[in-house]
Every structure is written in C-alpha cells, then in structure tokens.
Image: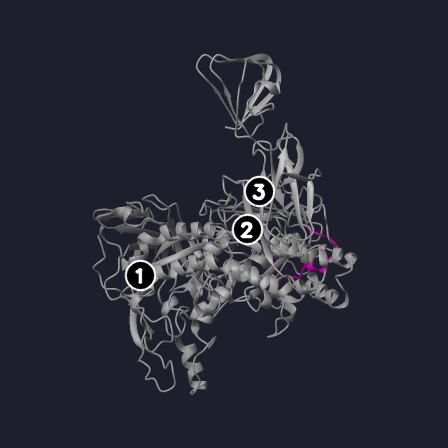
C-alpha cells in the first residue's frame, strides 16, 4: 500500500506506506540479512538488519515492513517510501543476486492495496478492504481501477453561463456527480438525509428546537450540465447553527453569492471507482474582479460538518448530553460540544482550490480537514485546519501562498477565523505577527482570503501556515520525528518534556546571579529568541497568554551542539501564535500589565514564568532585557510603523468587508468594523507609555529620558545603540535616520557603538561641541537627563553648511575656502565663477559640488571625488 490513509498505523501512530511479506512454507523464515528495494535495477538497495527476532516470519504467516523512510524507528522500517504514482518492490536473498520475489504496481488510490490473490498466487488484484498482517483470501479483489473523468471546461471565474460535459473512456461505466460539495456516489443517488439542530437549550429553561432534516444528493451524468450565476439560489448550509445559541444571530438575511461546485467519479461493478474530480465555477457579471483577495473553494460532504450526531462544526448531541447532565449550569467556557472533537478520527476528506489573482486555480487538490482552535471553536465562524497527505494524492501544498516567505511548499495550512477577534478587526493576530516577523522567533505568515464552503460564500478567513513538526522540517531541515514540542505547562505535543523539566529543576536549585549558572542556561535555550518572544507578547497586551498559547521546541540532541546549524543545536526556542486577545482597547487592554503577569507566581503561572524570573536575577541579563525592550519600543513597536501595518491590512480586506458582514452579521456594521480597526491604531499609539511605566515599576527605575543620536555624515558611518543599528534597513528606523531620538531608562547602562563605512574612519563622540570620547564604543552608565550625542567620522566637526572658493588653487588648501578649512563630507561646495580648483590626486569629499558658470574643477587621473548627494 503506497497511499495509506486510515488502514493501519505504525508504532508512532503514523499512516506509513507498507509491504506485506507472506511465508507459504511450513516452517518459519528469518529474512534478517535479506535485501529489499523499490527499484528493480538496484536489488540491494537496503539490507534488513540480521539477528533481530522481529524479522522472523512464522510458517504460513505474514510480516509488515514499513516503507516510512525512517529506519531509526525500528528494524521493520525501511529507508525509503513507496510512490503512490507507481513503482515496484523486491526482496532478494542475502547473496545479493537471488531474487526471491517482486511485483510492480501502477498508480494507487488511498487505502487501496495491491497484492496476490489467493495468498502467494501469481494473479495480482486491488483490494479495497485490505488485510495487513492477515490472509488476502478474505478480501474483495478487483482487477481494474477506473481513471478519473474528464471535464470539458476548466474551473474558474466566468461572466456567462457554462455548458459542462464530463467524459470517461471506461467501457460500461457510469459517471456520478454532485453539485452540493458532497462526495459523488451511487449510494447517494436520490438523496441522503441527515439531521441537524438550530435551537439548543443554551441557558436553563430555554426551549430547544426539534431536529431538522437536510440532504445531499448524487446524480447520474447523462447529458451536458448547464451552470449559471447562483447568487439568487436559496441559502443552505449557512442557515445551520454552528453554536449552542438558542437564537442564532449569524444567519444571513439575504441570498449569498455562490459558486457551482461540481464533483464527479467513474464507477462500474467489479471495478474500483475513480478518484473524485472537483472543479468550482464562479459565474457572475464581474468575473474574477468581484473579489480582490485570493479565493478558496473548499468542498466537504456537509453531513460531516453539520450532522447532529457526527458533524464536527456544530454543538450537536455532545452539547445536549452536557446540558442533560448539567441542567442548571450556564454554558461558559469549554462545555462539551461536537466541535470540540479532535484528532485524526475527526479528519474529513475534502477538496481545496486556491485562486490567487487569476481566473483559474493555482492549486486544486484533495485535503484532510479538521476544526482548528481552542475556545474559538465555540464561535459561529470556525477556524479550519488543512492537511496535505499522500493518501489524498499530494503530500504537500506546493504553492507560494505567502509573498514574504521564500518557500513554496507546506504540509499544513490554516484558514483562521481570527479567533476571539472574529467579530472585531478580523486581523489583530495577523498584524501583530507581521510587526515582529523579523525578530528571531517563529511567526506565522498570513494571507487574507475569501472562503467558499461547498459553493456558499463563507466570508473572510486568514490563510496561515501551521507551526508544528512539519514546519520545523521544511523551515530548518529538522527531522519531524526528532523534535520535542511542548505547550503551556510543559504538555507534550511531540517527543517528550524531560529536558525542559530538567531545566526547570536546575532553575529551582541554582541561582542565576552566578555567571557560570547563567551560561549553562544559555546552552539550554536560545536567549535572543526567548527574550524577543517575551517582549513581543508583553507589548501586544495578549490577555490570552502565560497561562495559554505558549509553544516551544527543540531538536532532540544529547547535549548542546554550539556549531550546529540554526535550530539543530538542541536548545529550546519559542513559537508565536494566537494574539487575537492582543492590541485591544476594551477592558482596559491598552494598560494591561503583561510584564507583571510574565513574572508572576500566582494563578498557577509559576512553571510558565520561572525561566524569565530566574534569568532576571542576573544583573547583566536584567540590563539586556530592559535595553532590548527599550530598543524595540523605539523601532519595531513605533506607533507609526504599527499603524502602517494596520492600514495595509485594512486596505486588503476593505473591499470585501461589506459582503462578509452580510454573511455573518458580525461585526454589526462597516462603521463598527472601522471603529474596531481604529482602536487597534489607538492601542499602538498609547501602549508604549504604559509599557514603559510597567518596566520602571517592575525594576524600580526612577525615570526615562530622550537620547538623541547623530552622525557627522551618513555616508561615513552609523551608530548602533545597544542591540539595534540605526540604519534605514532596521525595521522602525526612518530613511532619513539622523538625528534619531529614542527613550531610554535611567540607571541602566546604555552602549553606543560607532561603525565606520568602508574607506572612512571614526574620530570621536561629540556632545554640545565637546569631545567626550575617542573610543568607538561609548557606555553611558546612567541616562540622568536628555542627551544629544554625535558620532564624528573622518575628523568632521562643526560643519558650516557650505564652502565657497575664495580663489583659484588646490582643493586641499584651507585658505581657498570660505569655511576656513578643507571641505568636509557634510558640507556643500561651490566653486565660484572664474575660479579653477585643482585636485591632482587623492580623495576629496563633499555633500555636493556646484560649479558656477566659467569655473573649473581640474581632477587628475588618480583623484577621486566622493559626494553625499
């Protein structure tokens, strides 16, 4: 089986490719030392380990080999996978020459195996009911797999009706199709009914609604299908409750825009049905221009989402059971509901089409779909998680969804509903992560998109990449099976938590005021990653953090490996995600003291805050933390910079917001949405003052002051303040950088470093016309008042603004110039009418040079003139 979706799992619970070996003899056989291969021209590709009882096949017995490409998982795991597109498998005797047995196979469908029937016979068949580790004789064999049907018209946007034909070359076969997003099947011809509910006993005493009926249907294809604009068709799934509300307020009042989603298969008795082909047709007078954002069309059989008993997007039977067990309790928090179901068993197969800016989809593939999120699952508009797996045809999403990311392949995607921000700005988390995406911790790229679910307009969703073991593999080349990923209170997502628990124990037992102890901690965590992550969360005012939404990871190593590539050294690093509760004004969110929470031992926070609390005991780290926070407040978190990100994101979704509101009735109006966006900008403007106050309160700092920095000539050099280079390339630093002013804290030493550019030299630091140091690194022990300090390069000081020639002569003679000295790189030079200034050799510098009528600048072959403009 080269496409294992749900047939069998290995020891780690993974659905890997597998091969079953049968021993028809009357005695056991040990195949340790035998060779196996997926290439018939290379029979000795891999030798099975000898001396392990796992390789013994009992008489008339079976053995499963896992083609997982993960031999580290055990003796029966092979260092290659099988191609679902077709290849071969062979087993060869230990001499490397004697071929014991082999078979070749063509393209495989998910969970359809290929093998011998009866056991050990020469005849090869497909099996839709596979029996790994047991006899094939009880399975139903098929000798034909039907090819997928052909559609006469490409999926996409059209401005007029479409006449669609569907064809197959298979003899005596039937094409079945659907128009409602369901899986086409002969079992659903005539319609299949499921039940749902629109009114629950939300609060004690409410009168719940009765079970209602809805259906989906497959049709036998007989003639051309006529497709047209469906905007006036009645709404269907958008009028099914996705919460436990007694009176849902999110049903649309008018008919929604709709796409024609056509799904088709080929089937006939005695053969395995074809793969499902899915294509969406958006027909309206505006065509693709109706939507300015990328469009996603997601098709999932609707009962899997909305059925009262089994649907994973509704409150359903699980909520009613909870209500029966808790008749007097208000449903606050995580009360049970169908939409809280998690895990692989809840994953539904569907189809994903992605339309970027063109008329046709850039990507169209089968996917796994689950509900995504924590408490946000209780909101009407759900987040969705998309899985690319080989059993669905493609093991990756191969498309450049995110312009800011260099990659064009992803294993997991999210269609986020904006979580608790779902009815406010719709993008707080996305903006918050864009603001800090350049910092040394992992953030999620985002792309606002319009979603159609089973052809029905479903509103705005943020397409995101998911942070998990597959992200680590594709981003850092870390083996997905060799990582520890923890969340919140050291709960294990992947691997184990032993190393982090050991670190917490070390922090309890050792003081980090000792530099040696602190140095050890730096071998266990990436301190820059950790510090910036903490600062970013604190600045954001994320009210859903410290007790929640913490995720951290490491590559599994036995010890710190300092020379390893980034991410491979075995140290812990942090992910950032879910800042929907950040950047808020309401409930005094702009003033919230997250720094206090991040260092608190109350409310069960102790284990989550221990690392930062203990590190801040170290004076050097304390000063680094405070200065790094100040540096980022002065650059990354500048209100004008955040406002620009907010306005950019607002502009992206603005053309779509009215239709989104018409679908969900949340936010209540365009004016309400614009007010929510404006609150985000106000937060950015007001938050720095509160955060600085929190820092001063936490660390007992008496005051804060302006520090203004300048350079004598931007062409000659620049200044670094603590951790940031004051150059336009630094996020939050303006193009016209100098003079630059930031706010820093008294009683915390500040380090200034002057960096000269190639061909230039640093001379001295100047303040108020006085030289205060000639060392390129200047430490200010305490900023007790506002100060203005300038780095002087190439001996420049007191630039006069301009220098005019007083007579003809050599450039390098001070007496020739009105400024009284040889022109500096920061000065504008004027060669007066009738004068000839000679520069026979060497380098001359100026901000600019103006040569008046009748004047000359006579430069020798070895002379160079460097201009600032």
Instruction: Work out whether residue 180 or residue 136 is closer to the camera in this orientation and state it.
Output: 180
Secondary structure at badge 2 equals: helix
* Labels 1 and 2: the sequence-earlier one: 2
Label at residue 563: none
User: Which residue: 54% across, 64% down?
Assistant: 549
* Residue 834 in sight: yes
* Labels 3 and 2: the sequence-earlier one: 2
Q: Which residue is mark 3?
A: 726
Q: Position of residue 324 (x, y in %)?
A: 42, 85
Instruction: Name the image quarter holding residue 416.
Output: bottom left
**Left or right relative to 306: residue 139:** right
Magenta extent? 48-64
**Left or right relative to 116: residue 190:** left
Q: Is residue 202 above or below residue 108?
A: below
Question: Total label count?
Answer: 3
Instruction: Work out whether residue 496 or residue 869 is closer to the camera in this orientation and state it.
Output: 869
Query: Mark 1 Cα within 10 Å, few/some/many (few <14, many 20+)?
Result: few
Between circles 1 and 2, the one closer to the viewer is: 2
Q: Position of residue 798 (x, y in %)?
A: 59, 33
Q: CA distance from mark 1 to mark 2?
A: 32 Å
Q: CA distance from mark 1 to mark 3?
A: 39 Å
Instruction: Name the image quarter holding residue 757.
Output: top right
Instruction: Work out whether residue 263 or residue 245 is closer to the camera in this orientation and state it.
Output: 245
Magenta-colored stretch includes residue 411: no
Q: Which residue is mark 1?
A: 671
Q: Is residue 825 above or below residue 392?
A: above
**Left or right relative to 161: residue 726:** right
Q: CA distance from mark 3 to mark 2?
A: 11 Å
Instruction: Work out whether residue 769 or residue 400 is closer to the camera in this orientation and state it.
Output: 769
Q: Is residue 795 above or below residue 136?
A: above
Q: Which residue is mark 2?
A: 634
């Amino acid at each position: 089986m080269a496409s294992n979706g749900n047939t069998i799992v290995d020891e780690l619970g993974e659905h890997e490719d597998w091969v079953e070996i049968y021993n028809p003899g009357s005695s056991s056989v040990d195949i340790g030392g035998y060779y196996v291969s997926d290439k018939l021209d290379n029979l000795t590709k891999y030798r099975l380990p000898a001396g392990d009882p796992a390789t013994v096949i009992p008489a008339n017995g079976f053995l499963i080999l896992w083609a997982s490409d993960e031999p580290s998982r055990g003796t029966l795991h092979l260092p290659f996978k099988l191609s679902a597109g077709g290849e071969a498998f062979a087993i060869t005797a230990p001499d490397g020459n004697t071929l014991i047995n082999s078979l070749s196979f063509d393209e495989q469908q998910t969970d359809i195996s290929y093998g011998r029937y009866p056991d050990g016979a020469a005849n090869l068949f497909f099996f839709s009911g596979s029996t790994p580790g047991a006899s094939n004789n009880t399975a139903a064999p098929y000798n034909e797999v039907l090819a997928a049907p052909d559609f006469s018209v490409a999926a996409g946007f059209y401005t007029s009706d479409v006449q669609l034909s569907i064809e197959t070359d298979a003899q005596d076969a039937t094409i079945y199709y659907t128009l409602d997003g369901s899986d086409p099947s002969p079992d659903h011809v005539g319609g299949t009914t499921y039940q749902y509910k629109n009114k629950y006993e939300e609060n004690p005493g409410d009168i719940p609604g009765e079970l209602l009926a809805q259906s989906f249907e497959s049709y036998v294809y007989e003639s051309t299908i006529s497709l047209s604009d469906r905007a006036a068709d009645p709404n269907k799934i958008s009028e099914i409750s996705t919460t436990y509300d007694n009176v849902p307020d999110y049903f649309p009042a008018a008919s929604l825009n709709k796409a024609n989603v056509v799904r088709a298969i080929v089937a006939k008795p005695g053969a395995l049905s074809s793969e499902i082909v899915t294509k969406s047709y958006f027909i309206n007078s505006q065509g693709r221009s109706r939507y300015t954002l990328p469009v996603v069309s997601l098709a999932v059989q609707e009962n899997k989402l909305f059925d009262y008993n089994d649907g994973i997007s509704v409150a359903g039977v699980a909520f009613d059971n909870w209500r029966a067990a808790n008749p007097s309790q208000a449903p606050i928090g995580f009360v049970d509901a169908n939409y809280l179901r998690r895990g692989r068993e809840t994953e539904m197969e569907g189809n994903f089409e992605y339309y970027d800016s063109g008329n046709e989809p850039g990507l169209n593939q089968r996917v796994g779909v689950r509900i995504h999120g924590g408490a946000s699952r209780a909101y009407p508009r759900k987040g969705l998680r998309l899985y690319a797996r080989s059993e669905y045809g493609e093991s990756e999403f191969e498309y450049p969804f995110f312009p800011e990311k260099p990659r064009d392949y992803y294993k997991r995607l999210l269609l986020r509903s904006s979580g608790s921000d779902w009815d406010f700005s719709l993008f707080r988390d996305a903006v918050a992560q864009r603001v800090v995406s350049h910092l040394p911790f992992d953030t999620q790229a985002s792309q606002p998109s319009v979603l159609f679910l089973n052809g029905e307009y479903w509103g705005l969703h943020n397409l995101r990449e998911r942070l998990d073991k597959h992200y680590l593999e594709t981003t850092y080349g870390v083996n997905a099976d060799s990582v520890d990923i923890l969340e919140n209170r050291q709960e294990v997502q992947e691997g184990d938590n032993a190393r982090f628990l050991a670190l917490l124990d070390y922090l309890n037992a050792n003081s980090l005021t000792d530099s040696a102890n602190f140095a050890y901690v730096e071998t266990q965590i990436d301190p820059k990653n950790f510090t910036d992550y903490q600062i970013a969360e604190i600045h954001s005012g994320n009210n859903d953090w410290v007790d929640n939404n913490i995720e951290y990871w490491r590559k599994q190593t036995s010890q710190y490996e300092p020379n390893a590539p980034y991410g491979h050294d075995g140290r812990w690093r942090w992910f950032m995600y879910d800042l929907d509760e950040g950047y808020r004004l309401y409930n005094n969110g702009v003033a919230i003291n997250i720094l206090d929470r991040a260092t608190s031992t109350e409310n069960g926070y102790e284990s989550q805050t221990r690392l930062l609390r203990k590190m801040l005991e170290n004076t050097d780290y304390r000063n680094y933390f405070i200065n790094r926070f100040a540096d980022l407040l002065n650059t990354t978190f500048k209100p004008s910079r955040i406002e620009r990100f907010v306005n950019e994101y607002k502009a992206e979704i603005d053309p779509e917001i009215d239709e989104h509101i018409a679908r969900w009735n949340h936010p209540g109006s365009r004016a309400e949405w614009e007010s929510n966006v404006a609150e985000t900008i106000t937060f950015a403007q007001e938050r720095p003052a509160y955060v600085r106050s929190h820092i001063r309160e936490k660390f007992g700092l008496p005051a804060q002051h302006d520090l203004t920095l300048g350079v004598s000539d931007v062409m000659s050099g620049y200044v670094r303040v603590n951790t940031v280079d004051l150059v336009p390339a630094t996020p939050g630093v303006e193009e016209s950088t100098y003079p630059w002013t930031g706010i820093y804290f008294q009683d915390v030493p500040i380090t200034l470093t002057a960096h000269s550019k190639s061909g230039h030299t640093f001379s001295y630091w100047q303040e108020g016309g006085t030289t205060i140091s000639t060392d390129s690194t200047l430490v200010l022990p305490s900023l007790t008042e506002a100060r203005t300090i300038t780095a002087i390069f190439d001996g420049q000081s007191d630039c006069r603004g301009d220098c005019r020639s007083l007579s003809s002569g050599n450039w390098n003679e001070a007496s020739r110039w009105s400024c009284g000295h040889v022109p500096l790189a920061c000065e504008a030079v004027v060669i007066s009418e009738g004068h000839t200034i000679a520069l026979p050799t060497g380098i001359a510098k100026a901000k600019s040079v103006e040569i008046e009528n009748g004047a000359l600048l006579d430069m020798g072959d070895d002379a160079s003139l460097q201009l600032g403009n």
